[in-house]
């Protein structure tokens, strides 16, 4: 089974709630997770195409780029995401109330 990325998104925020910029690798990861949060928390059942997130992994040195699938686990409200192709997967906590939470606190189901 592939590793699961366990992410507390607040670790990618500075004291002002802004995305961290250093180290640059952390910023890249933060922006990736932020995109997943916006996709999953989008307040309509169908999110627009520009909110789609492509897999960033490069198995065998070829970019995967499969569309990431994400959902909110109802009990914990953690975001789960997975790449259907390469099985890269993760879980994001503490995303509620961040600037990327588009859900307005509403319960949503995609
Ligand atoms: Zn993938």
Image: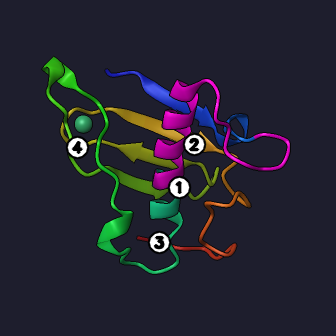
Q: Splitting the image into 4 quarters, where does residue 6 fall?
A: top right
Ligand 1 neighbours mark 2 (CB distance < 8 Å)? no
Label for residue 87? Answer: none
Picture residue at 18% right of the left edge, 39% below the top: 85
Discs 1, 2 touching: Cβ within 8 Å: yes
Q: Is residue 15 magenta?
A: yes
Question: Which numbered mark, 1 or 2, is in the foreground of this view?
Answer: 1
Picture residue at 31% right of the left edge, 36% below the top: 56
Label for residue 109? Answer: 3
Question: Given the current orientation, which residue lies at the most extreme right position?
Answer: 15
Q: Quadrant of ligand 1?
A: top left
Report, in whole angstroms, how far the alpha carbon at label 3 lies from the one at label 4. Answer: 19 Å
| Mark 3 surroundings: few (<14), some (14-19) or many (≥20) residues within 10 A | some
Q: Which residue is mark 2?
A: 92
Q: Which residues are magenta?
A: 14-35
For the N terminus, the image quarter is top left
Report, in whole angstroms, how far the alpha carbon at label 3 lies from the one at label 2. Answer: 17 Å
Position in image of residue 37 (x %, y %):
53, 55
Q: With respect to residue 100, does 88 lie above or below? A: above
Ligand 1 neighbours mark 1 (CB distance < 8 Å)? no
Question: Which numbered mark, 3 or 2, is in the foreground of this view?
Answer: 2
Q: With respect to residue 3, does 95 lie above or below? A: below
Q: With respect to residue 97, does 24 lie above or below? A: above
In the rendered structure, which disc, 2 or 4, sits on the residue that comes first in sequence? 4
Q: Which residue is mark 4?
A: 84
Q: Which residue is mark 1?
A: 37
Pick the front one: 102 or 72: 102
Discs 4, 1 touching: Cβ within 8 Å: no
> Circle 2 — which element?
strand
> Circle 3 — which element?
loop
Report, in whole angstroms, how far the alpha carbon at label 2 lies from the one at label 4. Answer: 18 Å
């Amino acid at each position: 089974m592939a590793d699961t990325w366990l992410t507390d998104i607040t670790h990618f925020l500075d004291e002002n709630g802004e995305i961290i910029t250093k180290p640059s690798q952390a910023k890249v990861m933060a922006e990736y997770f932020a995109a997943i949060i916006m996709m999953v928390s989008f307040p309509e059942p169908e999110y627009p195409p520009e909110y789609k997130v492509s897999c960033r992994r490069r198995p065998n040195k070829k970019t995967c780029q499969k569309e990431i699938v994400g959902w909110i686990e109802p009990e914990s409200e953690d975001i789960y995401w997975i790449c259907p192709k390469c099985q890269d997967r993760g879980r994001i906590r503490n995303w509620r109330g961040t600037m990327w939470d588009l859900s307005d606190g509403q319960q949503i189901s995609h």
